[in-house]
Amino acid sequence: MVENRPLLTFFSHAILILGVAVVAFPLYVTFIASTHTLEEILTVPMPLLPGDHFLSNYAQVLAAGSTRGSAAPVGAMMANSLIVALCIAVGKISISILSAFAIVYFRFPFRNFFFWMIFITLMLPVEVRIIPTFKVVSDLKMLDSYVGLTLPLIASATATFLFRQFFLTIPDELAEAARIDGAGPLRFFKDVVLPLSTTNMAALFVILFIYGWNQYLWPLLITTNESMYTSVIGIKRMIVGGDSATEWNLVMATAMLALAPPALVVVLMQKWFVKGLVETEK
Amino acid sequence: MRLKTLIAVLAAGLFSANAQAQTEIQWWHSMTGALGDKLGEIASGFNASQKDYKILPVFKGTYPESMTAAIAAFRAGNAPTILQVFEVGTATMMAAKGAVKPVYQVMKDAGEPFDPSAYLPAVAGYYTNSKGEMLSFPFNSSTVLYYINKDAFRKAGLDPAKAPKTWKELIAAAEKLKSAGQACVYTTGWPSWMHIENLAAWHNIPIGTKENGIGGLDTQFTINSPLHVRHLAMLGDLAKKGLFTYAGRTNQAEAKFYSGECAMMTSSAGAQANIRRNAKFDWSVNFIPYHDDVKGAPQNSIIGGASLWVMSGKSAETYKGVAKFFAYLSKPAIQMDWHIATGYVPITMAAYEVTRKSGYYEKVPGADMAVKQLTNKPPTANSKGLRFGNFVQGREVIEEEMESVFAGKKDAKTALDDALRRGNEILRKFEAANKG
Amino acid sequence: MGKRVVFRSAWLPYALLAPQIAVTVIFFFWPAAQALYYSFQLQDAFGLHTEFIGLRNFSDLLHDPYYLESFKVTALFSALVAGSGLAIALLLAVMADRVVRGALAYKTLLIWPYGVAPVIAGVLWAFLFAPSVGIVSWVLRQTGYDWNWVIKGDQALLLVVIAAVWNQISYNFLFFLAGLQSIPKSLIEAAAIDGAGPARRFWTIVLPLLSPTLFFLLVVNIVYAFFNTFGVIDATTQGGPSQATQILVYKVYYDGVKAGDLGGSSAQSVLLMIIVIALTAVQFRFVERKVQY
């Protein structure tokens, strides 16, 4: 901002506040709905102030899901989401950093070929190979398992490219020095590359954790056992059809629980999150 | 001497341990909430009644999800033994001759008595082949019924004890309700099941050639019959006048009824449990309306719901257990218990009789309306049921076209002609894929 | 390109690459090949009979007016989501760039929706707009507007667009803000000294300098609208009413999973793959010049 234009400044704040309000509105209504009984919500218009059933609703869903739809306890589902998110984040980072290291620091036959193989996976999001991937996982007897939920999702081109780009900025002198010291590539990796990569790894971890937690289509396909539901799936399964037949108060409580961790991660780890987002796309 | 005794004792112990090794039978189903609980109770009851077999019920998601999972499991070589499949999946299961073991075969091989005529004709007819052999075991069947809000009727000056019997009467009632200030006067659940499939059965006209598909894979739809066109046009007209409110493709209408928003509704018999629990007004359940200028109406309605299929590739011992379980399920006492708890119809005549004798229908009026409507008249070729391949897709196509009419985008004739054309394409594809 | 300093080892690079390549082959290439294979077959649900039918699945699709309609719906949906998402986010970013006080607070409050899964966004907005119980529906009814997305296709499309845009604003906002903050202040000051007002400065300096970000976001938003919005559709309209919100990726899922049509779904998958390849090629050719090899 260059000159002082109070009207424009006021206008800017107004727009921003409006934006924040519109963005926050669904969350507010969701929270309100999760603190009332079903009857209170079904009498239109529903109240816009918090009710007094916060504890009972949340206790209900955490322990035993809904009473008319899926009865899978949301607490267990959140545990599943956590496991899946962590496995995917850690898995993706691990295998991508190894692949990037191989591609950048070695000369070997077929290096180009492998590089392009990894690149092509960008063009094959799970949505375009839904049924065949499901079939492969089913044939491997990985349905309804943590392995099935996470393994197919941990090969990622973007993480590999991120690390590759970063490794290219590591000064050659470091590698040279390691070689002179007689350190093998793995020593170099462990003592030099890995420590240098921690900020990137942290940033990626935030992005990938959110990605893993919010997975929908893939878990939807391969989990049919209620004990393997993730929190994001659980919500859908509670909506049994029919406006008022769905226990909206419980659905909204579950929604709050399902969106809280990733939203909190975004807010509390904002710096890493922004860095991770910008780095993986540039 | 002692050693021999020891060995004999050990041997006896070993053998009895073997005899007690239970055969586990996996049963995949889609019953949620109270229905799922009751199903679990029944399975536990069977397990407790004998030692050789153990039924393991597993909830596998909605009907389409459970079926997809079962198909994938079959392809991977580990399908469940018993699978609950909804009625629209019947053709797919029947055509899968290598994947399923027909129930009549299971019962015969195990030497369990099994008499198809003990079942309600409308129920048995849906799941038997053209030779009269039952291919799947009916488990949860319902039909479509007509509910009215008696308090709303009173307010509009209508006699609440006289529910409309014909569509003409319904329209007259609708108009009166509207002028008395009712915002939504008529809604429906399961639009295709009610207004296309049951319309045909209730008026004794076909909706497909070859006995509605029961007679062969080369069936064609006949859903654009003059009566269908006239009926759908009527609904479209009512929608335009605000006398019919469309609520969605499944049972969304039920909530609109028991909340008091809509005064009249046609939907599944299974809605009664929720209505009883939630409605704060006086209501009644009745036969669905008919067009009184169609000869032969009202005939009987057809069922919805699901049946139990037995997958192939299991051991003979497993099939013995399945047969015993099905025999257990057929007991009138068990049937009555399931019927009362869930609102699904009692599937055998004996069960219906036992329930009637217990006085249940006096205590809970309307609980026997479904059976009465299903047995209104002996089923004809048009009202035995239907069997169309890929009917999940087929029904969605029909409902898409119906939605165009309700939204005023297409006229009834065009919509049904389009539905016919698209539906027949689906049937031909199914026929080609299952020819072998 | 490539490092000047490299290590030599006969087996180590392969070992390092092995996990990623293994997962890629088993879970990406093999299924993709199978999709291609099944797209040429006619098969019953249980896989008991298979018949090679060449390109018939494809020709059926391309002659099916409803599949072509799905293309149109997807295109319209993407245009609306990308267009409104970018416009709103740009406005918010420009405003956030201007203010000094509370900048961090605004930023925090505007980016948290990124953490919300698309399906949950769909559930939230479906609740707000539910025909009978939704609070927004109630307000609309008070003003006399007949809101019933269950029957009105246009309204259903509006609902999913709103949910998808809401979900995506944070992402766009962040990139626009980063882009705005990387514009040298000296340029802006110079223009101001020359007498250009804020509006003029925006159109002649800021927007052109922001165009790489804009273009990049455009491609990302379109890809997002094509694929990541599956959850939104599944939570709200499931493609209805009358296919008004039947986007391509939902149709693949529906035909494959609910309708059991493996051949048709595979053919659709193949066509979708072609589209993704085209979009990704565009993204990398024009936007990310970093992938030289």
Image (cartoon, rainbow, N blue to C red):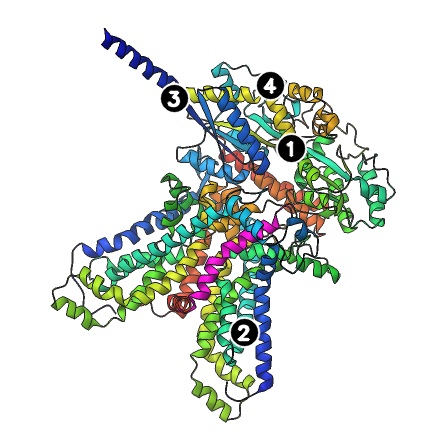
**Label 2 sits on residue:** C92
Q: Mark on residue B208? A: 1
Distance of mark 2 from mark 4, alpha carbons?
Answer: 70 Å
- The reply to whether callout 2 and callout 1 are in contact (CB within 8 Å) is no
Residue type at tag 3: Ala
Q: Is residue A159 above or below residue A66?
A: below
| Left-right relation of A140 to B238 | left
Element carrying mark 4: helix
Distance of mark 1 from mark 3, alpha carbons?
Answer: 49 Å
Residue located at (56% from left, 68% from top): C84
Residue type at tag 2: Leu
Residue B120: x percent and y percent? 65, 22
Residue type at tag 4: Pro
Region rendered in magenta: A242-271
- The reply to whether callout 4 and callout 1 are in contact (CB within 8 Å) is no
Write down the quadrant of residue B174 in the picture: top right
Q: Mark on residue B21? A: 3
**The disc numbered 4 marks a residue on which chain?**
B
**The disc numbered 2 marks a residue on which chain?**
C
